[in-house]
Amino acid sequence: MNIPYRPLALGLLVIGFSALVLGRAQAGGGHFYAPVTDAVVKEECGSCHLAFAPSMLPARSWKRMMADLKNHFGDDVSVDPVTAKKITDYLTAHAADQNGTRYGNKLLRDVAPSQAPLRITELPRWVKEHREVTPAEWKQSAVRSKANCSACHTGAESGYYED
């Protein structure tokens, strides 16, 4: 007599599990930013630091950054004009304010449309998310910099920034 209920129970179990998995995939755990997929961007930007997800800044910020590669946070990271255009086009096409990027828009809350911030680590949402990290933790040899996301977020290169 229990046989008619087995398919129903199994079906409910499958639906529940699928909802859980799909929910986590869609949310990315709440802190997913699609990683860089372009080989040139990965090579040029990722040779010195994590190639930051373009959806972490608005297009206007990427344009501003790419316009002054001779002074990229104190370093000259100039590339030829063709490469610069390719990188700029990729970053701006995948920026937080393009393509309805859900988590990028979340990160840009409290950033005025007239602002073109250059440092992800100075965005109000980023500061709020990291408020409990002590100055001593930032200075640890494994971390060294607020921009070294991979030191604490082991999935950063894949786009996951959960603790």
Image (cartoon, helix red, strand yellow):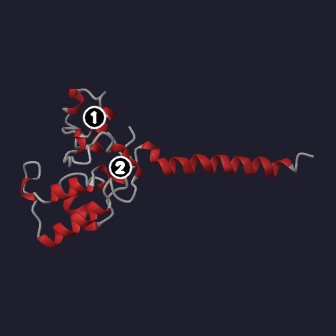
Compare residues 2 and 98 and report the one nearer the observer.
Answer: 98
Residue at image x 29%, y 55%? 54
Residue at image x 27%, y 50%? 57
Query: Where residue 145 sits in the image (x, y, percent)?
Result: 19, 39
Report which quarter residue 65 is drawn in: bottom left
In the figure, 128 relative to 66: above or below? above
- The amino acid type, in three-letter code, at marker 2 is Gly
Question: Where does the C terminus fall, quadrant-wise?
Answer: top left
Query: Where residue 138 sits in the image (x, y, percent)?
Result: 22, 33
Badge 2 crowding class, 10 Å Cα cut-off, few under 14, some 14 to 19, many 20 or more, is many
- The amino acid type, in three-letter code, at marker 1 is Val
Relative horizontal placement of residue 56, taking residue 87 as reference (left or right): right
Query: Where residue 62 sits in the image (x, y, percent)?
Result: 21, 56
Element assignment for label 1:
helix
Compare residues 83 and 10 and report the one nearer the observer.
Answer: 83
Query: Where residue 18 sits in the image (x, y, percent)?
Result: 62, 51
Residue 104: which numbered mark, if any?
2
Residue 59: which numbered mark, if any?
none
**Mark 2 or 1, nearer chain start:** 2
Badge 1 crowding class, 10 Å Cα cut-off, few under 14, some 14 to 19, many 20 or more, is few
Task: Determine which residue is flagged by label 1.
Answer: 127
In the figure, 154 relative to 87: above or below? above
Report which quarter residue 128 is drawn in: top left
Compare residues 29 and 111 and report the one nearer the observer.
Answer: 111
